[in-house]
Image (cartoon, rainbow, N blue to C red):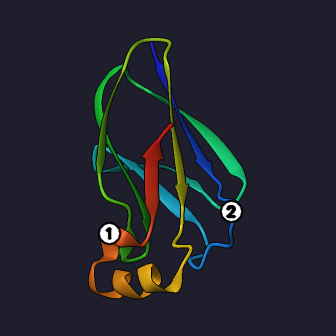
């Protein structure tokens, strides 16, 4: 039994934060997404999970999700797109990466 976490790194504008993003589920590293316009699919156990994206000291906010056996849950992620958010992330690192469920 397994489910799938699909994560797409995409936005029509240019990201200010580049480089690989580490994918964490339930506090454990489960993969990475390295560049803009990339999609990764990672098998996960059915049930309740948390998801966070990291790049060095910067991260997304943590998101919870439930997934059933055979289900695909999709998220979109990207780095900051405008300089005020990029600058604010210096003080509040969890603003640096956007993570939204699709």
Q: Vertically, is 47 above or below 76?
A: above
Q: Earlier in the sequence, mark 1 or mark 2?
A: 2
Residue pointed to by mark 1: 94
Callout 1: helix, strand or loop? helix
Foreground label between 1 and 2 = 1
- Residue 26 horizontal side relative to residue 80, left or right: left
Q: Dividing the picture into quarters, in which one does residue 13 lie?
A: bottom right
Q: Vertically, is 58 above or below 25?
A: below
Q: Position of residue 54 (x, y in %)?
A: 42, 64
Q: Name the residue at 35% across, 84% down.
A: 88
Callout 2: helix, strand or loop? loop
Q: Position of residue 35 (x, y in %)?
A: 68, 62
Q: Name the residue at 59% across, 79% down.
A: 16
Mark number for residue 41?
none
In this view of the protein, which residue sits in the foreground, 89 or 25? Answer: 89
Q: Are marks 1 and 2 in contact (CB under 8 Å)?
A: no
Q: Name the residue at 53% across, 54% down.
A: 77
In this view of the protein, which residue sits in the foreground, 57 or 90? Answer: 90
Q: CA distance from mark 1 to mark 2?
A: 19 Å
Q: Callout 2: 10 Å neighbours few (<14), some, many (20+)?
A: some
Q: Vertically, is 15 above or below 8?
A: below
- Residue 32 horizontal side relative to residue 52, left or right: right
Mark number for residue 35?
2
Q: Quadrant of the N terminus?
A: top left
């Amino acid at each position: 039994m397994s489910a799938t976490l699909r994560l797409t790194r995409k936005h029509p504008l240019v990201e200010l934060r580049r480089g690989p993003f580490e994918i964490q589920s339930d506090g454990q590293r489960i993969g990475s997404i390295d560049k803009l316009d990339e999609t990764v699919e990672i098998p996960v156990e059915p049930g309740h999970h948390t998801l966070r994206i990291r790049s060095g000291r910067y991260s997304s906010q943590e998101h919870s999700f439930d997934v059933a056996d055979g289900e695909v849950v999709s998220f979109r992620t990207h780095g900051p797109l405008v300089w005020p958010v990029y600058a604010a992330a210096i003080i509040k690192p969890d603003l640096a990466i956007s993570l939204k469920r699709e």
